[in-house]
Image: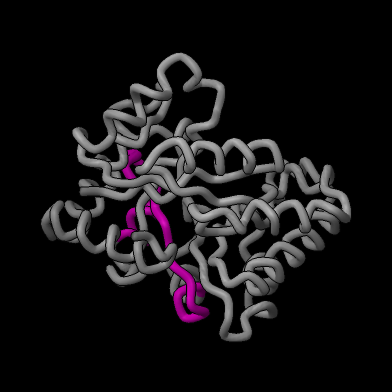
Amino acid sequence: MLIDSHVHLDDGRYDRDRDHLISSLKENGVDLVINIGADLQSSIRSVSLSEDYDNIYAAVGVHPHSTKEMSDSTIDTLKSLASRDKVVAIGEIGLDFYRDLSPRDIQRQRFIEQLELAKEIDLPVVIHSRDAAGATFDILKEAQDGNLEGVLHCYSGSMEMAMEYIELGFYISLAGPVTFKNARVPKEVAKAVPLDRLLIETDSPYLTPEPYRGKRNEPIYVRYVAGTIAELRGISFEEVANRTSENARRLFGLE
């Protein structure tokens, strides 16, 4: 059984068939999923989904794109949401210097604040980093006092940087791009990351893997991520499924 460590099933693209999709995950080999917040409203929806379905856990947080909308009270609201039983992480949080939808100084400030919240309430973090590898690493290194753990979601950086994040105490999560034909760097990372530091995800509804690229992504497609990693490493699909699921359960404290 697989665990999809990063989905957005509260997205409007699932409004027509959400219940059927979630209810059919186990019969399609997906044991659990973690639904990730990107702003306050999606964080609230994420918590609600986790309370409605046994096979969903939640993360709450504000994505760098939306940090410009945060106020001084946002952290208190996130803290309140994080007290709910099935909230297992703060995320997704981080830096995005590719689209720059929020000013970079605001992104940095709110990233640091949410890291401090995670340490205060003893939850791991789910990190988004795009075109900001150095800045993300520097902030995480500064924040790491032995009480911070988490995952670099949909990791797109170099193999060398992945090893630095692991040394810092973080996990690396791979998504649909590792299945893409010309995705040289993600494939290098997939072969090199220690199995005890690897997670898998779909980031549904985004980044659909081959052979469904271009269509709406779904958690059941996480098997293509696992299968590609198994092929690249020359190990069985079952080993990838078991090890990545163990890692997700350990990081997020899943039952």
Residue 189 on the magenta segment: yes
- Please check the rendered image and state whether residue 246 is part of the magenta-colored stretch, yes or no: no
Visual colour scheme = one colour
> Which of the 4 image quarters holds residue 65?
top right
Residue 177 visible, this orientation: no
- Range of the magenta residues? 165-190
> Left or right: where does residue 216 sit relative to residue 98?
left
The percent coordinates of residue 132 (x first, y second) are 66, 58
Residue 160: image x %, image y %?
Answer: 46, 71
Residue 20 lies left or right of residue 155; in this view the side is left
112 shown above or below 145: above
Locate the C terminus by quadrant.
Answer: bottom left
In this orientation, which residue lies closer to the viewer: 120 or 226? 120
Nearer to me, 145 or 214: 145
The answer to whether one can see residue 254 in this image is: yes
Q: Is 197 positioned to the left or the right of 91 in the image?
A: left
**What residue do we see at 47% from left, 63% from top?**
158
Give the residue drawn at x 34%, y 22%: 20
Q: Residue 253 at x, y = what percent?
A: 41, 65
Residue at x-position 35% and y-position 26%:
21
**Drawn side of residue 49 relative to residue 72, left or right:** left
Q: Position of residue 55 (x, y in %)?
A: 35, 43
Please name whichever residue, 176 or 92, is drawn nearer the observer in this view of the structure: 92
